[in-house]
Amino acid sequence: MKTRRLPEIDLAKFAVIDDQEHLEGSLRAFNTGGGSWSYGPSRQLIPDILAARLPLVGDLSAPSWEIISAEILRRCTRGEVQEQSNLEVSDLLYKYCGTEKWRSAKIDMHALPIGFGDSVRYWSDVVIQDDNGLFIPFFDHRRTKGLKGIQENRFVFSMQNFWIRERFLDLRSARLAVISFPTARKMRGLSIQFGKEEELMSYDELDSRVRRVYEAWAKVSEERTTKRRETGTDGPTPFGF
C-alpha cells in the first residue's frame, strides 16, 4: 500500500521523536487530521517574491507586488482563508527582503529522494546574500504549527548540508537557515535561525530517522485502512457515491 506523503515540516517533527510509542501516537493523531489548504502558492513564488536573479541572465526587473499578489490569488483554490494567509506571509517576505536589501540568485537544487516513493525539499531553489554573506533558506510558512524545536531545525539544517552544500562546491561555505513567520498578524519581522556546524547530523543518522518515521507511518496508515474495512466505512457507500 502506498502511504500518503508526509510534508517536510511534519517529517522534521516526527524524525526527532526518539520514543517509538510517542512517534506512532503522533502519527496516528496526524493521520486523523490534515489541513484543508496549504501555503503552496507562496512557496512556489518565493524566487519571484525575492526577485531572485537568474545566472547568466543578469539583473532583470523585479516583479511588482501587484503582479505577485495576483498570481498568488490565481493559484489559491481553497477559499478565502488560503488566499488571505498566503497573501499575508508573502507580503511580509516581500517587504522584509526590500528592507534588508537581500540579493538572491535562483539555482535549481532539485528534490532529495528519500525512498518510499517520496522526496523532500528543505530549500526553495534560491540562495540569499545579506551583509554576512550567502545562506540557503528554508521557509517555514506555518505560523502556529511550524518548526518550534531546536532538534527540528537541526534536522532541516542537516538535510540542507547533505543535499546542497555537499553537491554544490560554490555553496560549501554558505550558511544554513530556517526562516519563520510571526504568529501575530500585526508583527512584521521574520525569525531567522542559522545552523551550527558542530550540531549537524550525519547521512547515516538522517537515513535512519527518515526510515524509522516512514516505517511507522506505513504501520499507522495500514491500521486505519484495516479499521475502515472492518467497520464498513471504506469504499463506496451503499448508495454508490
Image (cartoon, rainbow, N blue to C red):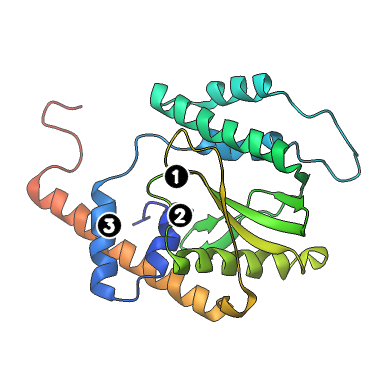
- Identify the residue under disc 3: 221
Left or right: where 230 falls relative to 56 = left
Q: Secondary structure at mark 2?
A: helix
Closer to the camera: disc 3 or disc 2? Answer: 2
Whether 225 is drawn above or below 154: the answer is: above
Identity, as a three-letter code, of the amino acid under mark 2: Ile
Mark 3 or mark 2: which comes first in sequence?
Answer: 2
Whether pointer 1 and pointer 2 mark residues with C-beta atoms closer than 8 Å, the reply is yes
- Identify the residue under disc 1: 142
Q: CA distance from mark 1 to mark 2?
A: 9 Å
- Identify the residue under disc 2: 9
Q: Badge 1, how many Cα within 10 Å: few under 14, some, many 20+? A: some
Identity, as a three-letter code, of the amino acid under mark 3: Ser
Whether 156 is drawn above or below 224: the answer is: below
Image quarter of the C terminus: top left
Mark 1 or mark 3: which comes first in sequence?
Answer: 1
Q: Residue at x 81, y 40 (%)?
A: 53
Camera-side residue: 211 or 148? Answer: 148
Camera-side residue: 68 or 194? Answer: 194
Image quarter of the N terminus: bottom left
Q: Residue at x 10, y 44 (%)?
A: 232
Q: Secondary structure at mark 1?
A: loop
Residue 202 in sight from this viewpoint: no
Q: How many marks?
A: 3
